[in-house]
Amino acid sequence: MKNSALYPGSFDPLTNGHLDILKRAVQMFEKVIITIAVNNRKESVFTGDEREHLIKEAIKEKEWRDKVEIEQFTGLLIDFARKKKVNVLLRGVRQISDFEYEFRMALTNRRLAPEIDTLFLMPDEQLTFISATVVKEVAFWGGDLSSFVPDNVAKALREKYTS
């Protein structure tokens, strides 16, 4: 797909930082494929199907929603990128520690697939502190999630942690 990119992640849960990166990405690419990593060896709050549904709900009223596809994948990201004929991976970077990890992953992906590039995007500075780990901790203790995640995700998290 010419002028398309993959935006991979676990999105467990989707945060406002993720949405900010996505909004920036659809301004640069004709199509952005959100690729939800499903790893059965990793404990997740939401299943892959639940994450897919939450993302669809969160973007359904965005004017750019038609430029976004959402798919789940397992295995190597570069294999999925090749299957989708996409040669750009989008990665959000909030802080130096994110960059160090993402830099190593980008170099590994380049070694395995030289035709695939990684593009790093930073969220709005007001969102740089948000991480899925922080969101899950706030949700677990019943805190206000309104500045961290879309409303539908906050509701789903409250349901998960109160049941």
Image (cartoon, helix red, strand yellow):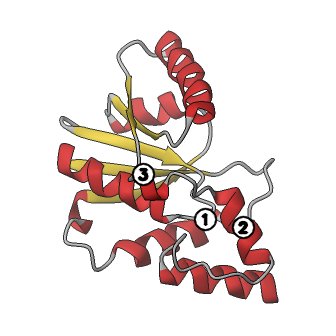
Mark 3 vs mark 2: in front: 3
* First in sequence: mark 3 vs mark 2: 3
For disc 2, the marked residue is: 136
Callouts 3 and 2 close, C-beta under 8 Å: no
* Above-or-below relation of 8 to 148: above
For disc 1, the marked residue is: 13
* First in sequence: mark 3 vs mark 1: 1
Q: x, y percentage for residue 16?
A: 46, 65
* First in sequence: mark 2 vs mark 1: 1
For disc 3, the marked residue is: 125
Residue 89: quadrant of the picture: top left
Callouts 2 and 1 close, C-beta under 8 Å: yes
Q: CA distance from mark 2 to mark 1?
A: 8 Å
- Relative to the observer, which residue lies in front, 78 or 13? 13
Q: Left or right? Give the position of 132 relative to 59.
A: right
Amino acid residing under circle 1 = Pro
Amino acid residing under circle 2 = Lys
Q: Left or right? Give the position of 91 relative to 24.
A: right
Mark 2 vs mark 1: in front: 2
